[in-house]
Amino acid sequence: MKLVAPDYYDKFSCIADKCRHSCCVGWEIDIDEGTYEYYKTVSGDLGEALKANISVCNGTASFTLDESERCPFLEKNGLCRLIKELGEGSLCGICADHPRFRSFYSERTEIGLGLCCEAAAELILKQEHKVGLITLEEDEESLTKDEEYLLGYRNQLFATAQDREFTVEERLENLGFLGGTHLPEKSFAEWADVFLSLERLDEAWTDKLNLLKQAKANAVPSSLEIPFEQLLVYLLYRHIPSALDDGDIASKIGFAVLSVKIIAAILSEEEKQDFETLAELVRLYSSEIEYSDENLNTIWDLLYEQND
Ligand code: SF4
């Protein structure tokens, strides 16, 4: 099995107590069986706290979030009590792994960092160079014909997304031509209604969608061309492999193009059009849309209907 990642992958580290949008708040955290068995052996105050703050539903253990939806082991100072008292190795699979995601091929795994994490978003969007892929673990890689085709096609999409001869808006057009992808003809106000009809977690996202209602353009500020390029490449890297399951590459390209247009349109209505505003907007978009299977599938279905 070959393991591949974007070339910035190893530079990631969690910013823990400096994180303003901790993944230890607002997310259900399931505990894998091995870790749950280990937690049962912990003694003393911490062992008691583990017993009191883990619930089991349909055979799956998870931390019982408090009334503010915080993990019970996230201390007020933003540090994790389990790491503090038991070390990093005591974390369950989900906590140790976040914000990583994986795409699986027959003999290849691609790993990446998800934009829902503010440290990952900052790292990804700040890359100046044309991001490439690196091999983390080299091994025989025998791919199916469909997988080989998809990877070759995605390389063309990367090259189009990274062609700095063109503006980002022109690159979006070029991606649409390359993929034969058509977005539904909707005004920004109509797109805002589509997104408002989806499941929403954070009121801040509703505020952004109200900004989208007023948007008139989705021009990318010239100072932010490269961060937008990184966003586009990330979306292609992460979502194109899903076409191996449903055979629908056009909707995945459409999703990348649409996401960039929507984020650029909201940004155009923000008080400031700077890197920090963009990074926060991208984090929010990712948490609300990419990290909800239901929302993601609704958008993909909408794009599929258009391209069928
Ligand atoms: S969201 Fe990212 S930076 Fe924040 S606590 Fe989680 S992994 Fe760390």
Image (cartoon, grey):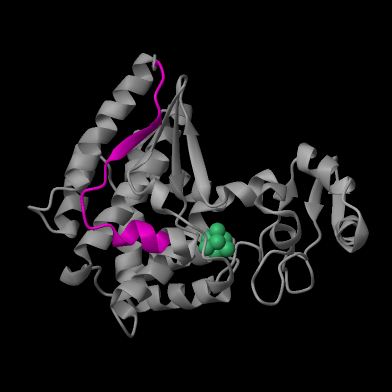
Q: Give the side of residue 84 with respect to residue 140, left or right.
A: right
In the rendered view, would you say 137 is above or below 35? above
> Residue 47's x, y, as percent?
89, 56
Regarding residue 221, the answer to whether it shows in the image is: no
Residue for point 30% across, 67% down: 264
> Residue 120's x, y, as percent?
44, 58
User: Farthest residue toward the bottom?
Assistant: 271
Residue for point 49% across, 59% down: 116
Q: Nearer the viewer, residue 32 or 40?
A: 40
Which quadrant contains ligand 1? bottom right
Q: Quadrant of residue 281?
A: bottom left
Residue for point 39% across, 14% down: 142
Quadrant where the C terminus sits is: top left
User: Farthest residue toward the left?
Assistant: 165
Q: Give the side of residue 184 with respect to residue 86, left or right.
A: left
Counting every numbered tag in the picture gives 0
Regarding residue 120, the answer to whether it shows in the image is: yes
In the rendered view, would you say 178 is above or below 208? above
In the rendered view, would you say 102 is above or below 218? above
Q: Nearer the viewer, residue 77 or 244?
A: 77
Q: Give the side of residue 16 with respect to residue 63, left or right.
A: left
Q: Which residues are magenta?
A: 121-140
In the rendered view, would you say 86 is above or below 246? below
Q: Give the side of residue 74 with respect to residue 220, left or right.
A: right
> Residue 98's x, y, as percent?
57, 51
Q: Is residue 273 magenta?
A: no
> Residue 280's x, y, as percent?
42, 70
